[in-house]
Image: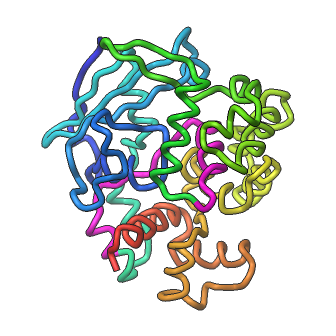
Amino acid sequence: MHAGRLPVTEFDGGFDLQATVESGQTYVWDRPDGGMFADEVAWGGDAWYHTVLPATETETSEPEVLRCRLGNEALEWEASTPRAPEHLTRLLRLDDDLDAIVAATPELPLLERAYEQYGGMRLVRDPSFASLVSFICSAQMRVSRIHGMQGRLAREFGDAVTFDGRTYYAFPTPDQLAAASEADLRECSLGYRAPYVQRTAEMVTEGVAHPDEARELAYEDAREYLTQFVGVGEKVADCVLLFSLDFLEAVPLDTWIRTAIEKYYPECDRGSYAETSRTIRERFGGEYAGYAQTYVFFYLRTGGE
């Protein structure tokens, strides 16, 4: 086992681990106490969380297990790999300067209340295929059910790895999901999303497209590129761009953001997704609009208004 500590003082703008991984951005983290997405009041807690990186994401021979919890002075970690600090910094965007990001967004009352409530929440940088599948599964689903689907996919189709006497499961590779039948996927509670996930995995495996290829494109071109995957519309594409591919300007127009637009920024509603997205991005400051979006989303979803 490898273990260590990353001092909180190194994280510009602070860090709230629980809010970061339980805010609806990511569904590939879990907590062994079974409380994932259950603690809707006591945010800022010190629970242990873990994720498993597939071997294809780490260029190693087997998946790598990462466990961490946030103490008063440091992010404590235990892992099967000595590269854990590097992985955690990348996955949890620990090198983002939150103070500078907040300062770069407009002084809007709603944003200020959200920042105050959940200071230290960071965006995640999930592996792109896992993020793509997670958000294909997200349509009309509560966050706890989306999380449950991804866990079942990992246990059923992903590689198992033993660490510290416990078995963990990596999120399936495209090959592993492409090999699954639609019936197999439906047994993981995917419902009508099962053929979407299967065909998307086949597209990646067959070399038709890969979400990582969107990284090299301009933002709106990248969003259009991702919509070629089965089951991916503009909102799902924006989620993948924001929570995996470093497009921090992306603003997914989900139910909560549309509610915010209707109540606080009605002039930003331009009818079409593309135009409304463009105007709310401008209202939220452009470059870091996705950070503003995520704070507003989480603040409203947890009853902030």
123 vs 286, nearest the viewer? 123
Classify 112 as above or below 46: below
At which x and y percent is residue 300? Answer: 40, 73
At which x and y percent is residue 67? Answer: 33, 28
Q: Does the magenta stretch include residue 27?
A: no
At 57% across and 90% down in the image, what residue appears?
Answer: 266
Is residue 221 among the parts visible in the rendering? yes
98 vs 22, nearest the viewer? 22
**Is 84 left, or right, of 145 in this rendering?**
left
At 37% across and 31% down in the image, what residue appears?
Answer: 50
At 41% across and 17% down in the image, what residue appears?
Answer: 167
Classify 249 as above or below 273: above
Q: Does the magenta stretch include residue 114?
A: yes
Give the total number of marks visible in the rendering: 0
At 29% across and 62% down in the image, what residue appears?
Answer: 118
At which x and y percent is residue 63? Answer: 50, 17
Residue stretch rendered in magenta on the structure: 112-140
Based on the displayed image, in which of its 4 quarters is residue 71 positioned?
Answer: top left
Q: Give the quadrant of the N terminus.
A: top left
Classify 178 as above or below 253: above
208 vs 282, nearest the viewer? 208
